[in-house]
Image (cartoon, rainbow, N blue to C red):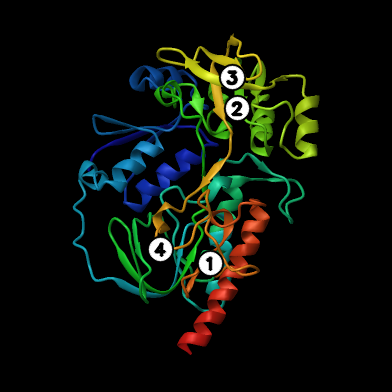
Amino acid sequence: MAEIVMYTKSWCPYCNQAKALLREKGQTWTEIDIEERPERQREMIERSGRSTVPQIWIGDRHVGGFDDLADLERHGKLDPLLGRTKAPAGAAEHVKVLIIGSGPAGYTAAIYAARAELQPVMLAGLQFGGQLMLTTDVENYPGFPASVAGPEMMELFQSQAERFGTRVLNEDALRVDLSKRPFRVETEDKAFLADALIIATGASAKWIGLPSEQRLTNKGVSACATCDGALYRGKAMAVVGGGDTAMEEALFLTRYATKVTVIHRRDQLRASKIMQERAKKNGKIEFLWDSAVEEVLGDDFVTGLRVKNLKTGALSKLDVEALFVAIGHKPNTDLFRGQLELDDVGYLKVEAGTTRTRVAGVFACGDAMDPIYRQAVTAAGTGCMAAIDCERWLAEHDG
C-alpha cells in the first residue's frame, strides 16, 4: 500500500472530501495541518508549487488537490496508484429509489424516502454535500439561530438520512439510460437498476474563463474563500461578483485580508439588501464598479489583476495576491441532456407545482431545477416534494 501524505487545515471542505474518498477506499494517511504547524506551509509550497490545501502525495507522486484526486478516480487511475485491484464488475443492483446528488435537496429527499421505507440509495458524488460544503456560515436556515457552518450542516443532513436507512455512496453517476424502466445508472464501479429516480445534482461555480485564471488556479485564484482565504492572511484580495455569494465571500475574507476589493460589471449589486449593507459598512471592503478582470497577473502566484472599466475602456492594475471568483453557478445537468427537458441555461424542467420531469418515474429537485430561488431551504423543500411525488407515483404504478 502506497504511503499517503496530505497537507490540510482544520476547516477545509476539499480536505474533508479528499479524506472521505480515501477512507472509502480503505486508506490511511499522514496528515500535516498547516494551521497547527505554520512552518510546514512553506514546505508544502516548495514541494508542490501550490499554496492551497489539500496537497496530496501518494508515494513519490504529487497528486495535487481534491479535484486532481477526484479526476484520477473518475478515469479509473486512482486504484492502481493506491495499489488496489479493481473488483470485477458485477450484475446491476436493483433498487427501489435511486437519488443522484446530495446537498439539502438530495439529503431531504433521502430522509423522506427512507422514512417511507423506500430503501433509497444515494450517489452523493465525489464532491458530496453540494454548495454548502463551500459556505462559511449559514444564517438563514430555520432552526440554527446562532448560524451553522455549511459542512457541519451537511454532516447533520447525511447522518439523519443514514439514520433512517439511506445507503450513501460517494460516487459519481457517469451514465444514465432513462429510455425504459427500471432506469439504468452507472458509476465507475457499479451499475443500478432503479424503479424511480430522484435527481438532485445541484449546480457548480462558474469561472471567468481566462487562460491566466486557469493557469493560476490554486496559486492565488480560488472559488472558495472558506477553503483558501486564511492562506493569504495579511494580503490584499479581490472578489469578482455582485450577488449574495460574492458579498459573503468578501465579508469572510476581511478576517484575513488587509483590503478586499469587490469587482462588479455593473454599478449596483444584485445581492440582498442585508448583505449589501453589511459589505458597504465594512471598512476593509472597497468596490470597483462597471469593471471586469481582463487578466490575472503573476508567474508562479497571483501578483495582481489587469482590470478594464467597461464604460470607458480604460485599463488599470490592481495589486492583490488572491482572487476569489463568485459569479454564479451552472446547473449540473449535462448527464441528462437529450433524455430530459432542459431550459436554455440547463435547468431541468418540471411540471408546474411538482417535481415530475417529462419521463414518468424521474423527479428533479434543488438547484438542478430551480433557476429562481436557489436557496438551501427551498432546495430542501423541493427534496421533500420529490420524495413525496416519488412515493405516490410508485404506489400508483407498482402497487
Say few, some or many: other residues with alpha carbon within 10 Å of mark 1 (under 14 / 14 to 19 / 20 or more): many
In terms of sequence position, does the residue under pointer 3 or pointer 4 come before the other? 3
**Amino acid found under the numbered disc labelled 4:** Gln
* 279 relative to 397 in the view: left or right: right
Residue identified by numbered label 3: 233
* 43 relative to 388 in the view: left or right: left
**In the structure shown, which secondary structural element does the residue marked by tag 4 occupy?**
loop
Q: CA distance from mark 2 to mark 1?
A: 35 Å
Q: CA distance from mark 2 to mark 4?
A: 35 Å
- Mark 1 or 3: in front is 1
**Amino acid found under the numbered disc labelled 3:** Arg
Q: Position of residue 225 (x, y in %)?
A: 58, 31
- Please report the residue visible at 39 percent of the width from the left and 74 percent of the height from the top: 95
Residue identified by numbered label 2: 240
Q: Position of residue 321 (x, y in %)?
A: 54, 15
Q: Which mark is residue 339?
A: 4
Q: Is residue 69 visible?
A: yes
In which quadrant of the rendered view does residue 108 lie? bottom right
Q: CA distance from mark 3 to mark 4?
A: 47 Å
- Is there CB contact under 8 Å for labels 2 and 1? no
- Is there CB contact under 8 Å for labels 1 and 4? no
Q: CA distance from mark 1 to mark 4?
A: 23 Å
- Please report the residue visible at 52 percent of the width from the left and 27 percent of the height from the top: 35
Residue identified by numbered label 1: 110
- Please report the residue visible at 20 percent of the width from the left and 45 percent of the height from the top: 80
**Amino acid found under the numbered disc labelled 2:** Val
